[in-house]
Image: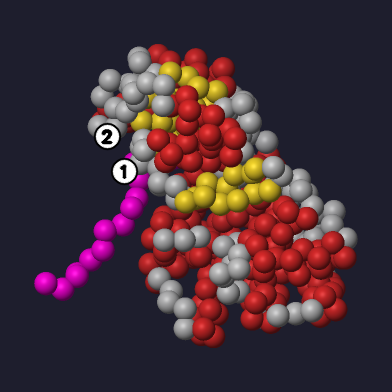
Amino acid sequence: MPLLARMLAAPMAVEIGPGAVAGLGTLLRDRRISSGGDVAVAVGPGYGDEIAAVVDPAIENCDILRVGEGGTLNSALELAAQLRKRFYDAVVGIGGGGTLDVAKHAASLVGLPMVAVATSLSHDGLASPVSSLSHEGQKASYGVQMPVAVLVDLDYVRTSPLQMRRSGVGDAISNLSAVADWKLAKRVRGEPVDGLSIALAHSGAEAVLYREGSVEDDDFLVVLGEALVLSGLAMATAGSSRPCSGADHEIVHAIDHLYPDTALHGELAGVGAVFAAHLQEDPLLVAELSNCLARHGLPRTHRDLGLSDEQFVNAVAYAPSTRPDRFTILEHLDLDEEAILDHVNSYANAVAG
C-alpha cells in the first residue's frame, strides 16, 4: 500500500490570548493530559509567586517547582531530579524562553509530556523540539520532545520587557534567510529539503515581516506568537532546526561564544539574517528585513549591537565551526577575514544608507 500521508508531531492544543494560565486546569482535563491535576508546574524566577497563586486553585494536586536559573543545563538536571521524586502526569513549564527550555529538557529526561505556557515571546523555542541551554559559559542545543500543548498568556506577555517582545520579531523573520540557505544547500550539494517545513517557516516569518502594528498591540502579538509556534512545527517537521537556522544562527552562536551577553537571541538573529541576505546577494530581502527591524526598534547591524567591525569579522569567521554539518552561504563562499571585512563594510553601509 502506498504511503499517502505522513504523521507529524504537533501540539494537541495551541492557545494564544489573555488568561491562559487561569485556564490551564481546564485544558489539562479536556485534553486528557491530567484529569486529576497531578502535574509538576515549573515556574521561572520572574513571575514565580504571582503565577503560583493563579495556578494553585486551578490544579488541585499540582506541585509548584521553581526554576532558579533559567536556560542552564544544571537547572534542567536539578528539575529532572525533582520530577523523579514522585509520580506526575505531566510537566507544565510557565515562563520565558529559558524556563521553557529547562522544562522541556527535564521532561524529556524523565519521559513526561510537557505543556508550555509562555509569558514572553522572545524567541521560537516555545514550541520547538529543541532546548538551548548553557553550561560552563557555552550554549548548546539539545533535542527534546515537542510540547503536547502550547499556551501564550498575553496578560503576562504584555508586561514582559519591551526588548524581549521585540527580540521575538528578529528570531521570526530570520527564517527567511535560513530557508534561502537550505535551498542553496540543495542547489550546490543536492541536500534534500522539506517543502512543508519550508512553508511553515516561511509563512510565519512573512506574517510578521509584513504585519502592521507593534509589539505593544495584542493583534500583533497574536501574529508573532503564531509565527513562533509555526517555527517550532517547521523544525519538528524537518527533524532538525534547518528551516529556522542557517548562516544567521551560526553567527548568533559565534557571537554568544566569543562575546557573551552581547544581546538577546532574537536581536542577534535579526542582524545575522540581514548579513546573510547580503551575502546571498538578495538586496530586496536585505531591505525588507532591515525595514522590519527598524520599524520595531531592533538592531540592524553589528554596530547597533555594540560590536566593532573587527569583532563581527571574528564572529563571522568563527561561525561555520558552530554547526560543522550545516551548509550555508558562509560555507559556500568560504571567505577569508579580509574578504569578510569587505562584506561587513558594504553591508553596514548599505543598511545605514
Left/right of residue 225 with respect to residue 329 in the rendered view: left
Q: Is residue 17 magenta?
A: yes
Q: Nearer the viewer, residue 16 or 101?
A: 101
Q: Which residue is mark 2?
A: 31
Q: Residues within 10 Å of mark 1 (few under 14, many from 20)?
A: few
Q: Secondary structure at mark 1?
A: loop
Q: Amino acid at mark 2?
A: Arg
Q: Is residue 210 visible?
A: no
Q: Which mark is residue 343?
A: none
- The picture quadrant where one finds residue 83 is top left
Identify which residue is drawn at 72% across, 52% down: 256
Residue 312 is situated, as x and y percent measured from the top left of the image, at: 81, 64
Residue 67 is situated, as x and y percent measured from the top left of the image, at: 57, 27
Of all residues, the one furthest to the left in this rendering is 1
Residue 89 is situated, as x and y percent measured from the top left of the image, at: 32, 28
Label 1 vs 2, first from the N-terminus: 1
Q: Which residue is mark 1?
A: 12
**Eyeballing the image, is 8 above or below 214?**
below
Q: Secondary structure at mark 2?
A: loop
Q: Nearer the viewer, residue 8 or 26?
A: 8
**Eyeballing the image, is 140 above or below 240?**
above
